[in-house]
Image (cartoon, rainbow, N blue to C red):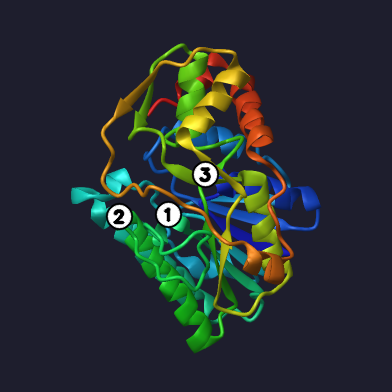
Amino acid sequence: MKVVITGVAGFVGSNLAKSLLARGDVQVVGIDSLTDYYPVENKLRNLDGLQDDNFDFVDGDLATLDLAPVLNGVAAIFHQAGQPGVRKSWGDEFGIYTTQNVLVTQRLLEASRSLDTLEAFVYASSSSVYGDAEQYPTSETDRPMPMSPYGVTKLAAEHLVTLYAKNFGVPTVSLRYFTVYGPGQRPDMAFNKFFRAAINDEPIPVYGDGTQIREFTHVADIVEANIQAWLRRPPAGSVINLSGGSSVTVNEVLTKIAEITGKDLDVQHLPKVAGDVFRTGGSTQMAKDLLAWRPKIDIDAGLRSEYLWMMGLSAADRQTSNV
């Protein structure tokens, strides 16, 4: 079986590729343009971990790449690629977000219309589409109200994914990720920054007062849900929350990191950033019903797994994580 993973050199994409390759019966074609949103060295390290006879890498920009030969004969497309980051989506860089999150998704969907082998088109959406949600836990039928340009582009792409299912029968499913963490986490994300600063005895910048609440989801649980979205074949056009069950404040996370590292943390509070919401937390009933999925890794075990991964890196590799 052939599957395609976009954004394969990234955090979720590389973990997903490893899991699929471990099955032994899947040919993985990974696409990535190795952009410099964070250090390319991190992505190259992820690719080094994917050396396998059943893995082929395509270095290309999905906005211009000839997709037909890459997608020929594919059973599943896992669309993990996109421009991340709430803070950088404001201002002059918004065009990058519309291209990499909306236009690219539309090109992939168009190319998928003619694929008679396609069993699943799995799109990585985000809890950012909810903004400050109407209720918690937030269900998939609650009104999305994104508070950042990033969230707007993720929601626009999600709408396209649903439209191609309803109009052309493309077997799509959108998975709304709630703050993913764990081994391989992007260096611009909070836990990576917190652990790196703790290990190096550096100040830890925290935007806001730390009372904001997040639902954190371990990358291994996210990977399992992606695979289930392919194998279980939920109704085309489904939109499903992937919320990890670990609903804690940032301050509580920092306390846990101090315990894990054995360090006294130097936390420095900075002004709240435009687009950051106070709380996230999603219902997982639909994931249970359609994917037979539930989160398995709690925040304590998950944080320790990320810490052990970071400690396993060389000092030089940890340094390349700086952004």
x and y, in percent, of residue 114 in the image: 55, 82
Q: Nearest the camera: 323 or 47?
A: 323
Q: Which residue is mark 3?
A: 10
Lateral position of residue 176 relative to residue 150, left or right: right
Give the residue displayed 37% in from the left and 69% down from the top.
Answer: 156
Give the residue displayed 38% in from the left and 47% down from the top.
Answer: 278
Q: Residue furthest right?
A: 24
Label annotation for residue 148: 2
The amino acid type found where label 2 is placed reads: Ser
Compared with 145, 55 (above or below) is above
Q: Nearest the camera: 40 or 213?
A: 213
Give the residue displayed 77% in from the left and 47% down from the top.
Answer: 22
Q: Which residue is mark 1?
A: 82
C-alpha gap between disc 3 and disc 2: 22 Å
Occupied quadrant, residue 29: bottom right
Compared with 27, 168 (above or below) is below
x and y, in percent, of residue 142 in the image: 46, 70
Helix, strand or loop at label 1? It is: loop
Give the residue displayed 41% in from the left and 41% down from the top.
Answer: 212
Q: Are marks 3 and 2 in contact (CB under 8 Å)?
A: no
**Where does the C terminus fall, quadrant-wise?**
top left
Q: Are marks 1 and 2 in contact (CB under 8 Å)?
A: no
